[in-house]
Image (spheres, rainbow, N blue to C red):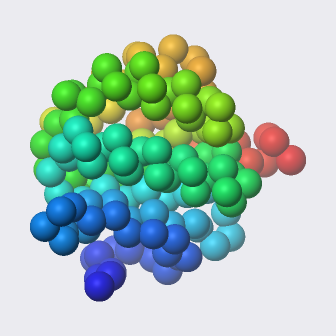
Amino acid sequence: MYKQLPGEIASTRLEELVTPTGKVFLQISLEPHDQWIHANWIGYPTHDNVAKGAITYLDWMKAKGCSAVLNDNRHLVGRWNQSLDWLEQHWVPYAVKAGLRYWAHLDTPGTFSAESADLLRARVRGKFEVQLFEDQAAAETWLKSKQTVRR
């Protein structure tokens, strides 16, 4: 069953992905007034969870006609460096094909997850815009500014 996290705002929950032991590792939402997918990662990021979750939120992005993702790793514990090669070789091309143009990554500074995000940004190499944030409001402002440019 879904439990709202502290500080979480109301949005349209699309899907929750769970581990084989039944623990939620990703909550995927559509922000109600903005056209982006909010991917809220929770717990320890195994390679299988990263791969399944990253593809799933892109599928939702495409299905909902969005071109942006707020990738929230503030509730993640640990790095996901073990998935960087897969993300570069498989996820990035899939993201481009699905129409991803803007990827706002939200993380807690100084964490292993933030380090992994910085490494991924270097591997994206301009295929879509990537910005790293420590503050959700700043990430949302950036995404909104990109929507204004597109309209």
Q: Quadrant of residue 34?
A: bottom right
Q: Position of residue 54 (x, y in %)?
A: 42, 45
Q: For this rendering, which residue is in front, 13 or 19?
A: 19
Relative horizontal placement of residue 67, taking residue 27 as reference (left or right): right
Q: Which residue sits at x=46%, y=31%?
A: 91
Q: Which residue sits at x=42%, y=19%?
A: 89
Q: Quadrant of residue 12?
A: bottom right
Q: Which residue sits at x=58%, y=66%?
A: 30
Q: Which residue sits at x=53%, y=39%?
A: 103
Q: Quadrant of the N terminus?
A: bottom left
Q: Position of residue 27 (x, y in %)?
A: 38, 65
Q: In the rendered image of this protein, does residue 62 appear above or below residue 93? A: below
| Observer able to see residue 107 | no
Relative horizontal placement of residue 119, taking residue 126 as reference (left or right): left
Q: Quadrant of residue 94?
A: top right
| Observer able to see residue 49 | yes
The furthest residue to the right: 151
Number of numbered markers: 0
Q: In the rendered image of this protein, does residue 36 appear above or below residue 22? A: above
Q: For this rendering, which residue is in front, 57 or 148?
A: 57
Q: Position of residue 29 (x, y in %)?
A: 50, 67
